[in-house]
Image (tube, grey):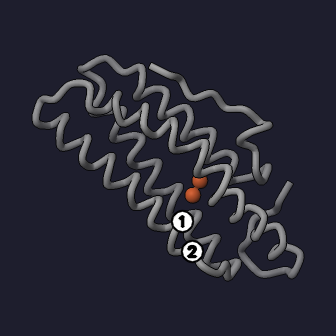
Amino acid sequence: MSRLEWQDSLHALQGGPMDAAHQEFVTLTNALADAPDAEELVRLTQLFVHCKEHFAQEKNWMQLSQMPAIDNHLRDHEGVLTLLESAAADLRAGVHGAGREVAESLAAWFGQHAATLDAALAFHMQQAARTDKPGIPAVG
Ligand SMILES: [Fe+2]
Ligand SMILES: [Fe+2]
């Protein structure tokens, strides 16, 4: 199983809340990747709860910073939630390994997503913060 490793040079974007959410994503994805059969569903549920909050926070930042053309980014998030829900259904049906498999897919997904859509959001937030729009977290 390939492990997802946090690397500042690849993953650090904003030096604040977005990076904290991404570090937690890495930790929870690795915990799922390493989960024995009996813990897969618990680990997958923890990752699902994290993703719901992480994606809702990013959507809020997109809206607060009035970022244009956010549909692709939101669709990408929805795809991850659908994948996790599908794996949870498989696990409940007794298909061991469905959680570890989805963790491997998400490890590959994260690098691409962080480097493109999240990087664009972090850049937009940095620009918006300079105009003193309310509710945008301090940037590093
Ligand atoms: Fe993100
Ligand atoms: Fe994102």
Q: Which residue is mark 1?
A: 73
Please tell me which residue lies in front, 119 or 89: 119
Please give left or right for residue 42 compared with residue 5 in the image.
left
What amino acid type should be assigned to the residue bearing mark 2? Ile
What amino acid type should be assigned to the residue bearing mark 1? His
Please tell me which residue lies in front, 120 or 19: 120
Please give left or right for residue 84 compared with residue 132 in the image.
left
Q: Which residue is mark 2?
A: 70
Please give left or right for residue 32 compared with residue 121 in the image.
left
Residue 8 coordinates in the image, percent (x, y): 77, 36
Residue 11 coordinates in the image, percent (x, y): 71, 42
Above or below — where is 81 with respect to 5?
below
Above or below — where is 89 with respect to 131?
above
- In the image, what residue occupies the spot 41% across and 33% down? 103
Question: How far, Cα to Cα, is label 1 from label 2?
Answer: 5 Å
Q: Quadrant of the C terminus?
A: bottom right
Please tell me which residue lies in front, 70 or 17: 70
Judged from the image, the secondary structure of the residue bearing numbered disc 2 is loop
